Amino acid sequence: MSDTLPSPACAYCDARSGGEPPHGDILRDSFEAVFTDWYPRVLRWARYRCVDLHDTEDVAQHVFTEVWLHSHRYCPRRGGLGPWLYGITAHKAADASAAAVRRHEGARRLRWQPAPETTDTCARTVERLGIAPHLACLPPDRREILFLAYYLGLTQSEIARRLDLPIGTVKSHTRRALKSLAPAVTERG
């Protein structure tokens, strides 16, 4: 049993053949040479067309997978190999770019969703412990860092990015704020 699939007749050539012999599956027969010659160009085209540059190699691989699986669709009498490969690359890059936009849009929506339900739990804890007046005495920057960390559940790295502060500053403000709140918590405890 052979690994090569029988190539169907070319519809373009059948309609215009005028008695000429069919061209066969020339891409499948010379796939290695086509891949070696055209891969760098397909990769370059993918770089120009992809939104996320990490997708370019995947797009190029998908193009040549498509070429292998559907090599019978190429007809040299309709035009050159370059435009045919460019068309496949454009479609695959558009698909990859749309997927990248959906991924990034989903991440953006998640990042800006309202705080999780733990906000209510944290607020009740602050009220129960009676440390709200002590929070009000903290400097605004330290109060904001505690709010982002304990009410919104952000990590120190996320707080640093959001407030455009060095991570060390966020850590030291957190430590100092918690240290100043410690007596109020142990007093109530």
Image (cartoon, helix red, strand yellow):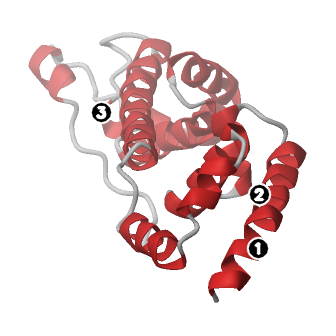
3D distance between C-alphas at marks 1 and 3: 74 Å
The circle on residue 177 is 2
Q: Is residue 22 above or below residue 3?
A: above
53 vs 123, nearest the viewer: 123
Task: Indicate the position of residue 174 as horizontal and vertical percent values.
Answer: 78, 56
Question: Is 41 left or right of 179, judged from the image as shown?
Answer: left
4 vs 85, nearest the viewer: 85
Name which quarter of the figure residue 116 lies in.
Answer: bottom left
What residue is shown with label 1?
Answer: 182
For the point 61% across and 22% down, the residue is: 47
Q: Going from the N terminus, do you reach mark 1 or mark 2 first?
A: 2
- Residue 158 is at least partly visible in this image: no
- Count of numbered tags: 3
Task: Indicate the position of residue 84 as horizontal and vertical percent values.
Answer: 40, 19
Q: Going from the N terminus, do you reach mark 3 or mark 2 first?
A: 3
Q: Going from the N terminus, do you reach mark 1 or mark 3 first?
A: 3
3D distance between C-alphas at marks 1 and 2: 9 Å
Question: Is 156 left or right of 77, judged from the image as shown?
Answer: right
Q: Residues within 10 Å of mark 1 (few under 14, many from 20)?
A: few
Q: Residues within 10 Å of mark 2 (few under 14, many from 20)?
A: many
Task: Indicate the position of residue 151 as horizontal and vertical percent values.
Answer: 51, 60
- Residue 159 is at least partly visible in this image: yes
Type of amino acid at the residue the image marks with label 2: Ala
Task: Indicate the position of residue 135 as horizontal and vertical percent values.
Answer: 62, 56
- In the structure shown, which secondary structural element does the residue marked by tag 2 occupy? helix
